Every structure is written in C-alpha cells, then in structure tokens.
Amino acid sequence: MEQARPEVDQGELERLDSALRVAESALEEALEAAENLGSFDRRFDVPRALAGAQRLVGNAREAAEAARSR
C-alpha cells in the first residue's frame, strides 16, 4: 500500500530554489577566489571544500525540482 505524499508548498519551494541559486553563485565566486589565492592554508583544502559545497547545493536544487514536478 502506497503512502500519500504530504502536500508541498510551491511558494516555499520557489523560495528555497531562489536561495540555492544565490548560494550557487556565491560558491562560484568563492571557489574562483580560493583558486586565485592558491594554497594559503595548510590545514584545509579550501577549493575542494567549496567544490563539495557546490555539489551539496546542486543536490538540494535537484530535490526541490523533483518536489516541484510532483
């Protein structure tokens, strides 16, 4: 027996997607700046961390898009 999916507020999905687009843009800028700076911190690989954050934001945008198309 299939469970009913809860109703998703489309306005909130749009708000989420908008915020994620801003985050994506900010991360692109941050990654470019970090790459221009080079290896400035021995403790962390900043470009790699930013690239990971970009992937997470991309995953969240995909989830929002999937919820919107239901």
Image (cartoon, rainbow, N blue to C red):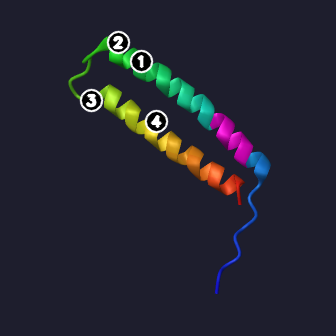
- At mark 2, the secondary structure is helix
Q: What residue appears at the point 61 percent right and 33 percent down from the top-left corner?
A: 21
The residue wearing badge 3 is 44
Circle 4 Cα neighbour tier, 10 Å, few/some/many (<14 / 14–19 / ≥20): many
Single out the residue that lies furthest toward the top: 36
Which quadrant, please, contains the C terminus? bottom right
Q: Is residue 17 magenta?
A: yes
Q: Label 1 belongs to which residue?
A: 32
| Residue at the farthest front position | 69
Residue at image coords 39%, 38%: 52
Residue 49 lies, in percent from the top left, at 35, 33
Q: State the predominant SS element of the stretch in magenta.
A: helix
Q: Quadrant of residue 69?
A: bottom right
Q: Where in the figure is residue 36, as x and y percent of width and height? A: 35, 12
Find numbered disc 1 in the image and state the secondary structure of the residue it sits on: helix
- Give the mark nearer the N terminus: 1 vs 4: 1
Label annotation for residue 54: 4
Specify the amino acid type for callout 4.
Answer: Gln
- Say whether marks 4 and 3 touch (CB < 8 Å): no
Q: Amino acid under label 2?
A: Asn
